[in-house]
Image (cartoon, rainbow, N blue to C red):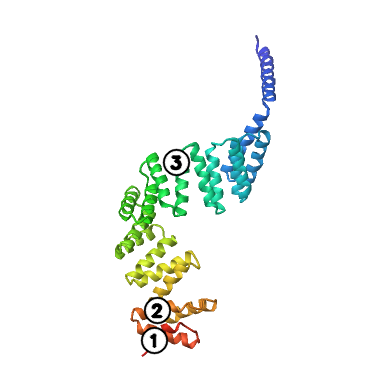
Amino acid sequence: MNNQDRLFFYPIHMNRLFYFFILLLFFGCDKNTTRDQSFIKGRDALKEKKYKKAETQLLIAVKEDESFSEAWNNLGIAYYEQGEIEKALDTYQKALSIDSCLIDAYQNKANALFKIGNVDDAIITLTNGLECENLNYNLLLNRATLYQQKKKYKRALNDLNLCLQINGLDDVLLTNIGYCHYSLDALDSAFHYSIQAIEINADRHEAVNNLGMIALKNKEVNQAYKYFSRAVEQDPQNVLYRLNLSKAAISIKNYDSACKNAKMADYYDEGNTQALNYILRSCVFTMEMKIFFDYCLELYQKGNISIFNVPLKELRNNDKNEKYCELSKLIKEKNIKIDGNLLSKCK
């Protein structure tokens, strides 16, 4: 065979292969292929956070195969991420009606129920999922979290201890176990598990905060102040830590620290009533009185008519007569009415 023959033969062979593949594609284009391709595209779109595109592709998948439970579940995620929670719930339920042990659908449904504040039904949903897999780590952990929110700490502990058996020592688990024991007033156990968490991860600030709360309950205020200070260093924007630190600082009369942290708590969560209370109780000792008065006056004019009661009481109880009289004078100049029980003579 000469070169010319070879050139002629090769294209004929390629054409046959080409038509062979065309036939394969033709017979392969059944509904399962369309279904699977749409599912993959939808799943990839979810990963890319293109939720409308994901919805479009997954709708094609379930239209091709109404019994495709995984596609229904993923479609629920697309709805959820677009804020269509009721649609998401219906879609997760559709997935579960097809596959009653689709664990991801139980988890996603519980998450959606929690999103709309239906904690009780979220717990029931997770419990139903655990009937399929009684030692599913994620379902147990999520249910424990919800039990904690409902203040059912003994039930939360049961789930968390099972998680510990499944996953071994874990700083997050140990922190939550410590908190449950704290809430049940088992302070020795709370301390033990919180310390274990920190030994695993020194940056586990939730466990450090646990230790501060345990110290406060044990009336070890100076120790509590140290723990809360450390928690704030690790997570400066955490309002709870700032409030706890401010509370401990007031107890040891460290008003500079108390005022600073209460104001930061109010900055990160404007209007927080506990932060305001701590500001009134501490900043009155540290701020220039005219500036403090103007701060309170603004709140008074907005309707908080008892705003001056707390700082006056704090000054009087701490024998700060000069500051008490200075604040009282400013109050009288503006004809502001205050609780008569707080009136004292000023020299």
Mark 3 vs mark 2: which is more N-terminal?
Answer: 3
Q: Amino acid at mark 3?
A: Tyr
In which quarter of the view is residue 76 placed? top right
Whole-percent x and y of residue 25?
Answer: 67, 25
User: Can you identify the residue that label 1 sits on?
Assistant: 344
Q: CA distance from mark 3 to mark 1?
A: 62 Å
Q: Is residue 35 above or below residue 216?
A: above
User: Can you identify the residue that label 2 sits on?
Assistant: 313
**Which residue lies at the image location 56% right of the left edge and 45% below the top edge?**
109
User: Can you identify the residue that label 3 sits on?
Assistant: 137
Whether residue 50 is visible here, answered yes or no, is no
Q: Which mark is residue 316?
A: none
Q: Single out the residue that lies furthest toward the bottom.
A: 347
68 and 199: which one is in front? 68
Whole-percent x and y of residue 207?
Answer: 36, 54
SS state under label 1: loop
Q: CA distance from mark 3 to mark 2?
A: 52 Å
Mark 3 vs mark 1: which is more N-terminal?
Answer: 3
Q: CA distance from mark 2 to mark 1?
A: 10 Å
Task: Identify the image quadrant of the C terminus.
Answer: bottom left
Whole-percent x and y of residue 108?
Answer: 55, 44
SS state under label 3: helix
**Which residue lies at the image location 52% right of the left edge and 50% below the top edge?**
120
- Asked if the residue at tag 1 contacts the one at tag 2, i.e. Cβ–Cβ closer than 8 Å, the answer is no
288 and 218: which one is in front? 218
In which quarter of the view is residue 16 placed? top right
Q: Amino acid at mark 1?
A: Ser
